[in-house]
Image (cartoon, rainbow, N blue to C red):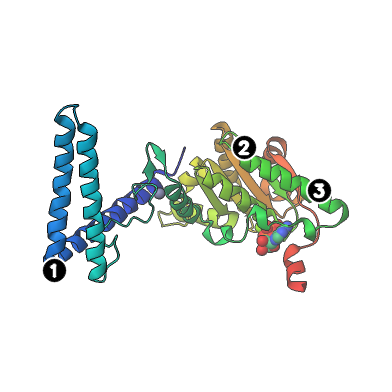
Amino acid sequence: MAYRKDNLRTVKQAYTEKRARALGIARARLAELHRTIPELCEIDSALAETGMKLVNAITAGAEGITERVAAIRAENEELQEARAATLRFYGYSADYTDVHYECEDCKDTGYVGTAMCACMKRALSLLSLESAGLAPLARTQRFDTFSLDYYQGDDRLTMQANLEIAKRYAASFTPASESLLFLGKTGLGKTHLSTSIAVEVIDKGYDVVYASAPTLFLSLEAQKFGRDSDIHIEEAEDADLLILDDLGTENPSPLHVNFLYRLVNTRMVSGKATIINTNLTVRELRERYTDRVASRLLGEYLVLGFVGKDVRMQKIGT
Ligand SMILES: Nc1ncnc2c1ncn2[C@@H]1O[C@H](COP(=O)(O)OP(=O)(O)O)[C@@H](O)[C@H]1O
Ligand SMILES: [Mg+2]
Ligand SMILES: [Zn+2]
């Protein structure tokens, strides 16, 4: 899995701290109660002794081992009950001095055996959405919030097919998946479906970069002049999946056109998938981004046409 390395490091660090905190709290509570409740001290020493006794009972030979072990077990249980009763007597819950992990499955290590725990996968996904630039969109733009009710007649059939292709694409994604070009007027769900795909792809552990074309081009210029930028061009080049949104909303300079051509080629050559969204028609795409770029996209990408009436407007109207 190609989790972005610094994200994995950040999450692992957070888990180490979280676990240390949980252990520290339990230790501090125990120390405090041992200081203030002498009975508890005695019970805990006795409990520690039963551990030793158990070892001795087992190593003392086969004869009578079952009885010996059973006796110690019983003693241990009694002590545990006494301990719980003592804690309750002083107004604490029976598990007050236990370590309270956020996740009992992995005890805040992030791993169950050698497998990554579900809680850590979730934490990593959230962080990846953040660093992919998708956190705000991902809250509302998911497959399960994409409705076909906004499209009528043949448009609905077309959009149903698009939705199915997008779902299948996300479910079977690998960086070697084909690239997609979403064409269509504004408000028809291009960004929504791209985000839906991204969320699932991130959940699978892939590294996704989402960038609007204007932001990417601004970042390109900033980087050229050594300034800090929102999007790091190398990350856009290297991501397992790059989503380039809103191509055509800016007025491209020859520099932009060249950069886009190189970006598309670099990713194609390294066998990495890209999703490009544009409000431009095929003709406008050729005019603004040259034949060379348009042919690449139209020839090598799977082209999905988005049709219907502006969903944003429909939503306002209802
Ligand atoms: N089929 C749909 N079901 C529910 N909401 C949709 C649908 N299509 C678009 N929207 C919503 O309408 C708004 C515009 O859609 P968006 O995906 O940004 O359009 P585009 O990228 O094609 O311009 C967004 O808030 C989006 O979540
Ligand atoms: Mg859009
Ligand atoms: Zn866990």
Which x, y percent locates residue 45? 13, 53
Q: Residue lying furthest right in this view?
A: 153
Q: Earlier in the sequence, mark 1 or mark 2?
A: 1
| Residue at mark 1 to residue at mark 3: CA–CA distance | 73 Å
> Quick check: can you spot residue 317?
yes
> Quick check: can you spot residue 97?
no
Q: How many marks?
A: 3
- The residue labelled by disc 1 is 36
Q: Residues within 10 Å of mark 2 (few under 14, many from 20)?
A: few
Give the left or right position of residue 71, taking residue 305 as reference: left
Give SS at disc 1.
helix
Looking at the image, residue 148 lies above or below residue 164: below
- The residue labelled by disc 3 is 158
Q: Residue at x 13, y 68 (%)?
A: 36
Quadrant of res 99: bottom left
Q: Residues within 10 Å of mark 1 (few under 14, many from 20)?
A: few
- The residue labelled by disc 2 is 172
Tag 1: amino acid: Thr
Viewer-nearest of discs 2 and 3: 2
Give the left or right position of residue 111, taking residue 269 as reference: left
Tag 2: amino acid: Ser
Q: 101 or 147, which lies in front?
A: 101
Quadrant of res 127: bottom left
Q: 268 or 122, which lies in front?
A: 122
Which x, y percent locates residue 213? 59, 54
* Tag 1 and tag 3, C-beta contact below 8 Å: no
